[in-house]
Amino acid sequence: MEAKIDIERIRKGDHVAFKTFFECFYPKLMALACRFVDEQVAKDLVQEVFASYWEQKKMIQPDNIQSFLFKWLQNSCLNHIKHQMVVDEYESRVRIAEARIAFLGETSDANEVLKSVINQDLRDIIELSVNKLPPKCAQAFRLAYFHDISHKEIAEIMGISSRTVEGHIRQALIFLREDLKGLFMLIFMLCNIN
């Protein structure tokens, strides 16, 4: 049947020749595609190969048209599979993220107690580290982060300039980042458990 295929007529835009070409290769290409993907996807991919071939018919001059079409379709199938794997991985990550959000967003007493215990434990650990700071530095940090007081108000309370308050808080943050880096790593690992 392949002898009836007139590639030159197809290259010139002959629809009858292309119909013969299509009827010859469609079953073969479908059989190949169905080895990789389900039937509906196979139909779509085979149609895409034929449509692309028609659009590029003047530029394509393979030595063996069947091998060329098979290779083209095989690449299309593999690209589809790779894309589907990315989509599936993304959907899996979204489901995990939604489950985490749902867990954290639950308002059950057990979850509230757990959150309260974790928050208190974290605050106790941070407080131990804050106690290592110089007294004025620790005081400025506590007022800013534990009591949510502005730098200007802290300056008035402590009888120092706002600039000095900023310096104390900057010094505290630098120290705490270093002193608590193991805690931050633990929190990061807990948040990223799959």
Image (tube, rainbow, N blue to C red):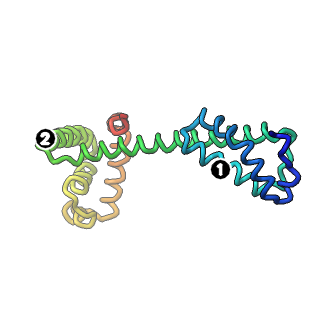
Disc 2 versus disc 1: nearer the observer: 1
Q: Secondary structure at mark 2?
A: helix
Residue designated by label 2: 113
Quadrant holding the C terminus: top left
| Image quadrant where one finds the N terminus | top right
Mark closest to the chain's N terminus, 2 or 1: 1
Is 113 in front, or is 52? 52
Query: How far from the left and from the top, in percent, is residue 185?
Result: 37, 36
* Residue at 76%, 55% in the rendered image: 54
Instruction: Find residue 62 and report its horizontal and vertical position in percent.
Output: 85, 43
Disc 1 is placed on an element classified as helix
Circles 2 and 1, Cβ within 8 Å, touching? The answer is no
Q: CA distance from mark 2 to mark 1?
A: 59 Å
* Residue matched to label 1: 47
Q: Is residue 78 visible?
A: no
**Label 2 Cα neighbours within 10 Å, binned few <14 / some 14-19 / many ≥20:** few
Q: In this view of the protein, which residue sits in the foreground, 95 or 155?
A: 95
Q: Amino acid at mark 2?
A: Val
